[in-house]
Amino acid sequence: MDKKENCGLFGIFGDPDAAEKTFYALHSLQHRGQESAGIATSNGETISLHVGMGHTTRVFRGGKDVLSALKNPIAIGHVRYSTSGSRNICNAQPLLTEYSRGQIAVAHNGNLINASLLRDEYEAYGNIFKTTNDTEIIVHLLAKPSHVAKPDPLGHVLNHLQGSFSLLFLFPDRIEAARDPYGIRPLCIGKTKSGAYCFASETCAFDTIEAEYVREVHPGEIVTLDKNGLHSRWFVKPGTITPAHCIFEHVYFAKQSSMIFGENVHEIRKRFGAQIAREHPADADVVIPVPDSGTSAAIGYSNESKIPFDMGFIRSHYVGRTFIAPGQDVRDLAVKLKLSVVKEVAKGKRVVVVDDSIVRGTTTKGKINALRQAGAKEIHMRVSCPPVLFPCFYGVDFPTKQELVAHNRTMEQIKDFLEVDSLGYLSVEGMLACATLPQNHYCTACWNGKYAVPVTTIVNKFIMERYQMQLFEDEPVQL
């Protein structure tokens, strides 16, 4: 899978070990971002910050010495992979700054499609930006005098944002969490054994610190944690906007143990696998996954098809997700380092390979070649989501349409490109049938081009320029 990902958030209020718990929670969310990490903490009056490039263990390699300098009862943390802004320490989050109302630290998961437009406007009036990411525009909006004067400045500012956002704001005396009105990216609330409330992108972070899942932050909701406990308000009237949850969270992003959008990731991936076995059966001797995100779907395929499951690829846990590699040559090398073939599983066998998704297709082709070299007799590729035909503007940095393997190719052409004996993608209808929420509550834009968030003509122009495309220059290929 050749793609960049979004980010992971965690926040906790009223715990003497807030910084340490945030570190461990971020470590459990590392799969959501491996480029940079950071923790901001507050003693109730002043915010302290530590950020750096790389994994959480690298950023906080000073261990207790670094965390002791952050020892305060309020904390937010962030792991990042850039979908907006360059790979630079200035873009690491949480982003700490100061404005007329004092200090504020911000952590963001998502992508603001109107950030460039707003930035141009503010720079024209003399505002100076310190980063190149889209999150900083939120602080400039909060600092605008006319916004500061509003009864609810944060709610007013959030209504200016277009795109996807799950946000944590650390003020010296509180944490405020917010989620965009469509609920595109996940954000949930937990509670520790000591009674401290916390926020996280995924519930796996709660498991790490032995916190109990309470509920999701609702789309369009602002949840505040302060000395008075947990309370919330709405910046968008409930029920006025149909949710558009990113189902790619279930396909790929989220950890198998997490609860996302109300259901376990492992269980829904197994249902994806079972559904694709019904849609695209194969005569084969063994089903093997591309680990780790393809494993659950492969189990589902095996259970439904009655074809034995085995581990034909072994993953090295010392190599990060291959989408992180910046160039194709590096990605190809990363695949070889990351996955090794168990020759005894593949040799002389008719093999069903189950992967979560295919984007460019080049790394998938490398995996297929490795199986051929190991002596696989036949290779039947099965993909537990539909063909990716359109870029995502909501926090997944897919390549341009022209780079997508499914763009302007028929199923037969994709099969020939990958050099497999047969190829089957899960249908959009089949995928949505596996989910428990109403089918119109999920975003499927990367498969059918139906973008959930309405965009103005000006923002539309920015999108086309950024992705070097015309949104609907042709119809999706019927596969």
Image (cartoon, rainbow, N blue to C red):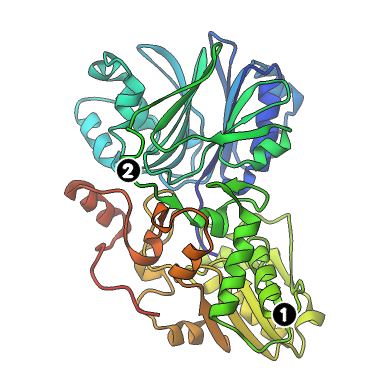
**Viewer can see residue 59:** no
Q: Amino acid at mark 1?
A: Lys
Quadrant the C terminus occupies: bottom left
Q: Determine the residue positioned at 39% across, 29% down.
A: 130
Q: Determine the residue positioned at 62% across, 80% down.
A: 368
SS at badge 2: loop
Query: What x and y, as percent, mark residue 449?
Result: 32, 63
The residue beneath circle 2 is 241
Q: Amino acid at mark 2?
A: Ile
Quadrant the N terminus occupies: bottom right
First in sequence: mark 1 or mark 2? 2
Mark 1 surroundings within 10 Å by alpha-carbon count, few (fewer than 14), some (14 through 19), many (20 or more): few
- The residue positioned farthest toward the top in the image shown: 45
Q: In the displayed structure, does residue 187 sit left or right of residue 296?
A: left
Q: In the displayed structure, does residue 56 sit left or right of residue 159?
A: right
Query: What x and y, as percent, mark residue 317?
Result: 73, 56
Q: Determine the residue positioned at 70% across, 73% down.
A: 303
**Viewer can see residue 240:** yes
The residue beneath circle 1 is 306
SS at badge 1: loop
Query: What x and y, as percent, mark residue 186?
Result: 50, 43
- The residue positioned farthest toward the left in the image shown: 457
